[in-house]
Image (cartoon, helix red, strand yellow):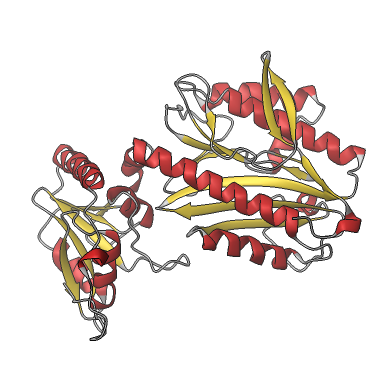
Amino acid sequence: MSATALAPNSPMSSAEIPQVDLQRLEEVNKRKELLCEYLKIKGFDSLLIQDPANFAWLTCGGDNTRKGNSPPVAAALITQEARVILCSNVDSGQIFDRDLMGLGFLLKERPWTEDLTILRQDVCRGRKTAADTWFPGTENVSSDLTPFRVQYGERERERFKALGKDVVHAVEATARNFEVGSTESEVAGHLAHRLIKHNIQPVQLQVMADAQGWRYRRWSYGEDRIERQCIISAIGRRHGLHVGVTRSVCLGAPSAELQQVHRLASVVQATGLFFTQDGWKMEETWKRVSRIYEKFGVPDEWRCAEQADVIGYHVSETSLRPNSQHTFREGTAVYWHPSVRSSLVGDTILVGSGNSEVITPCQNWPVISVQVKGQTIERPSILIREVALGRID
């Protein structure tokens, strides 16, 4: 392993040496055993992991990128005998010091001047190797690994909840504080700042000014100025996990039409959240959701954009379509983000054995009450800002 360079006048003290996380080590061991059993059943000698989502899952939150959605700079090779990190001398020190300390990984490194593809080909040569991405001489088994990733332990559930809280705070604070007349890009910049401040990587940002979403349901942001209303949405990643949330704000009193479509989108979302239950297929849940669209006279509105995704180590582990046979399981994270004309709503839940838990609850935000099967579900309302006040703290 490459030695971490230290200035002569500032040696590393014992207090600066990271302590081994024994619970994390135990979980990494379990995941390695699961993969070894998979290799045995499938008849493979080894598994090459390059996808950042699978790398984060295997290492319980490790990162094989240099942030900023960069390509992977390290891979993991799993065999019955060992787990090995493959990377260059530039990245090995950081990966082992900051991400993989004491987790039982070995290292094979090459100088940064050498193509890492050669190293990966060398370790795969002579082995029947599976891989989670396309790689010469291996068999792509990426779809086989999805079920491993979406079964979350207690550590991951707590991380989901903490991440949800911080993403909500960033989105709601941005909505309360942007200046009237700001461009979408300026607001997106403020949102990204708040996320990064909490070590959250902005993965998808949407700032839609003045009914922009009516035309482009998956608009990100541009140079349009916000004069009347705005939808702010973010998907953030931390420890490899993703959480999504959306909020709407109006500068001055909202029109009757805006209130109507926002409430309808909220009813659709509440129905989806309520019927996303352990053991249910998406097809069953969708029947209840589609009835809401039909009941309120917009039966084809769902065709304009995606409605929900199983979210986790990937932004979308599974896109939930009307005829999907995906079965919800307890502990799965689902991001419901339906849209109706100019309104978009979005929140993330953890599926429970009974009621699911919303992990992106409002923190300082108005709510509306929606009735689903006799149960009251509170959903985020439209934040109304007085234009004369400009900035609201």
The C terminus - image quarter = bottom right
Displayed quadrant of residue 345: top right
Q: Is residue 276 left or right of residue 265?
A: left
* Residue farthest to the bottom, as pictured: 8
> Is residue 28 at all visible to an observer of this figure?
yes
> Where does the image place residue 186, in percent across and percent down from the top left?
71, 68
Q: Which one is nearer the viewer's eye here, 390 or 300?
A: 390
> Where does the image place residue 85, in percent across and percent down from the top left?
21, 62
| Residue occupying image coordinates x 24% and y 50% | 21
Q: Which one is nearer the viewer's eye here, 387 or 205?
A: 387
Above or below residue 113? Residue 86 is: above
Q: Which one is nearer the viewer's eye here, 10 or 122?
A: 10
> Where does the image place residue 97, in percent across and percent down from the top left?
25, 66
Q: Is residue 190 left or right of residue 315?
A: right
| Residue occupying image coordinates x 53% and y 22% | 355
The N terminus - image quarter = bottom left
> Where does the image place residue 312, in percent across and percent down from the top left?
44, 44
| Residue occupying image coordinates x 55% and y 25% | 283
Above or below residue 355? Residue 19 is: below
